Amino acid sequence: MRRTTSRSTSDQISDIDMTPMLDIVFIMLIFFIVTTSFVKESGIDVNRPTAQTAEKKEQAHIIVSIKADGEIWIDKRAVDVRAVRANVARLQAENPLGSVIIAADRDTKTHVLVQVMDQIRLAGITNAAIATETESK
């Protein structure tokens, strides 16, 4: 006589399908990547001037920083004043809705700031803003 063997219940329970859990993890990962807002930093710290009329700007995608010694930084790298126009135009082409913020140190010479603003306007951007700190009363 032949005996038929059947699988025991413990063998059937040990096979757990991991596919639905991995699907959920990947969907959550995509959700968090899409909803995360990335903040671009200029790469340097500047001592910004204060102003009573300072307003908070929600999104600034292009930040041009000017150090006290006149060194200009865009996208975490130092650039010459003549290269500001090309860099800003390239970044503006990548994100047309982004605005330009000039973060100049309070000890920056005025002629450097004017040169940078002139290069930004030559790149076709007319609404560049200057970053300031709010003045405490």
Image: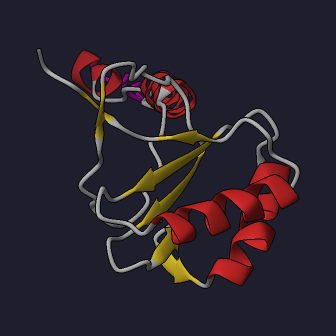
Residue 89 drawn above or below residue 60: below
The structure residue drawn at horizontal position 36% and vertical position 70%, both measured from the top left corner, is 67
Residue 30 % position (x, y): 55, 31
Q: In this view, does 49 lie above or below 46?
A: above
Image quadrant for the N terminus? top left
Residue 74 coordinates in the image, percent (x, y): 55, 67
Q: Say above or below: 110 vs 21.
A: below
Quadrant, the C terminus: top left
Q: Work out whether residue 71 or residue 110 is closer to the camera in this orientation and state it.
A: 110
Whether residue 137 is visible, yes or no, is yes
x, y percentage for residue 20? 50, 22
Q: In which quarter of the image is residue 89?
A: bottom right
The prevailing secondary structure element of the residues shown in magenta is: loop
Q: In this view, does 119 lie to the left or right of 122?
A: left
Q: In this view, does 5 lie to the left or right of 75?
A: left
Q: Residue at x 64, y 79 (%)?
A: 81
Give the x, y percent position of residue 73.
Answer: 49, 71
The image quarter containing residue 109 is bottom left
Q: Which of 18 and 22 is in front in this view?
A: 22
Per the rendered image, the range of residues in magenta is 1-8
On screen, residue 129 versus residue 21, left or right, reads right
Q: Using the image as rendered, state which of residue 119 and residue 56 is in the foreground.
A: 119
